[in-house]
Amino acid sequence: MTVLVDPPAWPGHGRLWSHLASDESFEELHEFAARLGLPARGFDGDHYDLMESDYQRAVDAGAVPISSRELVTRLTRAGLRRRKRH
């Protein structure tokens, strides 16, 4: 299992957000997110948006803290990166 989380640094709705992702599979990511109780609407194509208040809980549950740049690199390398369409 390789679930990754970047630091809460992304502002939105008056909060800071992290990205929770897997460099193995979306199935693994969805299962991990369900165990944390994250809503399905938090999934954004290739990651879950994770409130700053849930960051430590994700790490305690086994998510590996890495930089945002490394998270994108690992998703891209695994073929799981999905860019937003505008």
Image: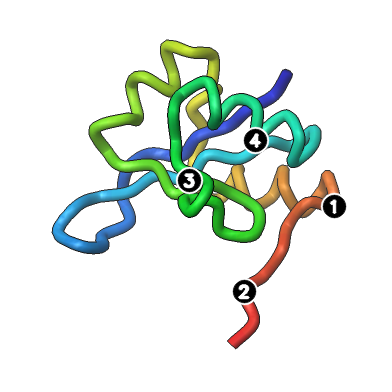
Pointer 4 local density, CA inside 10 Å: few below 14, some 14–19, many at least 20:
some
Left or right: where 50 falls relative to 19 = left
Q: Observer-nearest residue: 47 or 78? A: 47
Q: Earlier in the sequence, mark 2 or mark 4?
A: 4
Foreground mark, 3 or 4?
A: 4
What colouring method underlies this structural image?
rainbow
The circle on residue 84 is 2
In what quadrant of the picture does the C terminus appear?
A: bottom right
Q: Quadrant of residue 26?
A: top right
Q: Residue 67 in the image: x percent, y percent? A: 49, 40
Q: Earlier in the sequence, mark 1 or mark 3?
A: 3
Q: Residue at x 33, y 21 (%)?
A: 56
Tell how many labels: 4
Q: Earlier in the sequence, mark 3 or mark 4?
A: 3
61 up-or-down from 56: above or below: above
Residue furthest to the left: 14
Q: Residue 52 in the image: x percent, y percent? A: 27, 38
Residue at image mark 1: 79
Q: Residue at x 44, y 49 (%)?
A: 49
Q: Residue at x 48, y 13 (%)?
A: 61
